Image (spheres, rainbow, N blue to C red):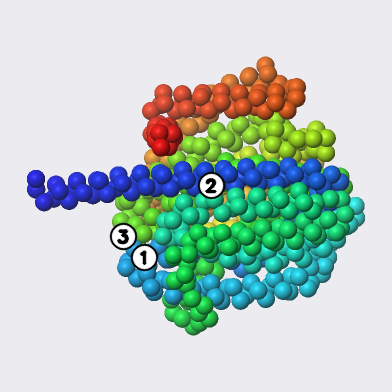
């Protein structure tokens, strides 16, 4: 065998091995996310059961909004999008110690900043929420006051969440996805325990519950630290803001920090518009719909994008643009192949899905389900569009162009409230909020794709053909699911309700995959093979 043939054979085996490794890692992350989302659903179900008064239910939900905003403003997406690819590139280039020093400095400086912010948040929670309450209707002023009291326990929580997220970012750079996949589930279990033990319709019960949530965040951090101790023990406190490697990392991180905070600002905008409606229960309904649409988005798009990020960053740093383009193409199509049918199912079966997940007692009424179902219809488009936005953002982060997602986010920051105001003025009601959010993501998608396509060597390929085939498959699936839903409307007890929904979803999956196989779509074969391989294991 010639030398070049041997090299080509080794390269093929290496690429095949890497592809299998990424597929296994993706499935592990998906399993972790499914468990995380499932326990998250349980958490929301118990919120409805324990906070039976919608006033306290909405207050508990709203109490997370401002602390989460500060978390995203200070650290947020920069962990995955800046820290992970930077460290991954350093490891790939044989400069692990240099990369770890920059990461240590990053963690040290931002840890100190977060401590200061958490302290100020605890002291000035009332004042912060008073400013937020200026947009709320008079009927919701007590809700905002209760949320301010509860948030005092949630500001310390974001410090521990930051530490846990930093642990995950470092371990993902080492492609230790199995070590990071199940931490969020641990957090949700302890949050669920806090709700069961402390929740109730009083101010004291509300504050005690958020104190329990803070404890859950502490346990989450300890779990991530000890499970990845062999790598994380190499980090040291290093407060050196003038370190040149840290400055390089910071320049990448700052646009990402702003982009992440823009996402949270848009959530604040939606909650603010929701409080302007006189009827209670809007905040919790919006939260329910958000939780549901982020299930397929989080399990499929986020899992695939996070696993792709370190590998794509390493390929780009090695100037392997063709391989980088192929990787991005396959990951984008794989994610869309799963999220496109998910979105259609949520549109057709919106109220059925809400009831199946959240209606486990009289505390959650049919009116609550219909309210959340309306929001869910508006969010459904975002399942698809945010898949593209997230994957493309990861691609820009991998190649170091972090300002482009920032530009896209800024456009969204302007478009979202303007569209909300426009549609509410036109009398569209609550769906105006989530429909505006979805339309905003379409604008962001266009900006990201147009700019990324400028470098033809990096651009994803065969996307149009894939979209046409997927559209035909999903139309066939949608028509059949709609007819089945008309013939078999949701009725009976909880078991019958769940059984009917499961039957409709199974029919949808079978029809969609059958159509995809008829078109010989590689994505259908890929996921069937992965599931078979995992089943054999």
Label drawn at residue 32: 2
Left or right of 410 in this view: 89:
left
How far apart, in angstroms, are the residues tagged by discs 3 and 2? 32 Å
Q: Nearer the viewer, residue 419 or 211?
A: 211
Image-based side of 84 in relation to 163, left or right: left
Query: Decide: marks 1, 3 in contact (CB < 8 A)?
Result: no
Crowding around mark 1 (Cα neighbors within 10 Å: few <14, some 14 to 19, many 20+) is some
Q: Secondary structure at mark 2?
A: helix
Picture disc at residue 37? none
- First reached walking from the N terminus: tag 2 or tag 1: 2
Tell me the residue that label 1 is attached to: 91
CB within 8 Å, label 2 to label 1: no
Q: Relative to residue 331, is residue 402 depicted above or below?
A: below
Rendering quarter of residue 500 = top right
The answer to which quarter of the image holds residue 321 is: bottom left
Viewer-side label of 2, 1: 2
Residue placed at 53% from the left, 72% from the top?
A: 107
Residue 155 location (% of width, % of height): 71, 66
**Badge nearest the viewer, 1 or 3:** 1
* Residue 319 image label: 3
Position of residue 301 measured from the top left corner of the image (x, y, whole percent): 52, 46
Residue count near mark 3 (Cα–Cα under 10 Å), binned few <14, some 14–19, many ≥20: few
Which residue is at a point 69% across and 67% down the rendered structure image? 156
Dividing the image into 4 quarters, which one contains the N terminus? top left
Q: In the current view of this chain or complex, which residue is farthest to the left?
A: 1
Label 3: element kind: loop
Distance in Å between CA atoms under marks 1 and 3: 16 Å
């Amino acid at each position: 065998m010639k030398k070049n043939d041997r090299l080509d054979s080794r390269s093929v085996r290496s690429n095949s091995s890497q592809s299998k490794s990424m597929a296994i890692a993706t499935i592990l992350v998906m399993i972790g996310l499914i468990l995380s989302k499932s326990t998250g659903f349980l958490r929301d179900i118990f919120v409805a059961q324990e906070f039976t008064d919608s006033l306290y239910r909405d207050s508990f939900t709203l109490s997370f909004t401002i602390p989460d905003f500060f978390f995203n403003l200070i650290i947020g997406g920069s962990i995955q999008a800046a820290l992970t690819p930077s460290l991954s590139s350093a490891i790939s280039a044989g400069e692990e110690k240099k990369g770890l020093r920059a990461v240590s400095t990053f963690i040290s400086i931002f840890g100190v900043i977060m401590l200061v912010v958490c302290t100020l948040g605890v002291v000035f929670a009332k004042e912060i929420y008073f400013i937020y309450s200026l947009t709320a209707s008079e009927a919701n002023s007590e809700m905002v006051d209760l949320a301010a009291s509860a948030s005092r326990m949630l500001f310390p929580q974001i410090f521990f969440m930051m530490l846990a997220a930093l642990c995950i970012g470092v371990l993902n750079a080492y492609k230790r996805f199995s070590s990071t996949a199940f931490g969020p589930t641990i957090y949700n279990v302890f949050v669920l325990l806090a709700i069961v033990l402390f929740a109730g319709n009083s101010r004291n019960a509300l504050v005690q519950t958020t104190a329990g949530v803070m404890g859950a965040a502490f346990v989450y951090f300890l779990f991530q630290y000890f499970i990845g101790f062999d790598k994380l023990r190499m980090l040291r406190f290093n407060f050196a803001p003038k370190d040149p490697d840290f400055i390089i990392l910071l320049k990448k991180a700052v646009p990402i920090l702003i982009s992440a905070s823009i996402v949270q600002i848009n959530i604040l905008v939606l909650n603010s518009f929701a409080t302007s409606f006189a009827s209670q229960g809007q905040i919790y309904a919006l939260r329910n719909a958000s939780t549901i649409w982020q299930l397929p988005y989080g399990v499929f798009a986020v899992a695939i994008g996070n696993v792709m990020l370190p590998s794509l960053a390493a390929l780009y740093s090695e100037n392997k643009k063709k391989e980088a383009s192929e990787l991005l193409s396959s990951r984008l199509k794989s994610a869309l192949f799963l999220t496109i049918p998910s979105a259609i199912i949520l549109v057709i079966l919106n109220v059925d899905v809400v009831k199946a997940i959240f209606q486990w007692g009289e505390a959650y009424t049919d009116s609550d389900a219909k309210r959340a179902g309306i929001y869910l219809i508006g969010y459904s488009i975002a399942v698809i569009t945010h898949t593209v936005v997230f994957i493309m953002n990861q691609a820009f982060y991998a190649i170091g162009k972090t300002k482009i997602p920032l530009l896209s986010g800024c456009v969204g920051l302007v478009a979202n409230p303007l569209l909300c105001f426009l549609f509410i003025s036109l009398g569209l009601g609550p769906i105006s909020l989530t429909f505006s959010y979805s339309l905003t993501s379409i604008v962001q998608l266009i900006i990201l794709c147009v700019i990324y396509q400028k470098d033809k060597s990096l651009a994803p390929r065969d996307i149009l053909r894939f979209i046409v085939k997927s559209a035909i498959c999903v139309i066939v699936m949608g028509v059949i699911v709609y007819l089945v839903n008309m013939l078999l409307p949701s009725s009976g007890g909880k078991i019958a309700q769940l059984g009917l929904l499961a039957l409709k979803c199974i029919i949808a999956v079978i029809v969609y995959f059958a159509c995809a196989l008829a078109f010989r779509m590689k994505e259908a074969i890929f996921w069937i093979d992965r599931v078979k391989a995992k089943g054999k294991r």
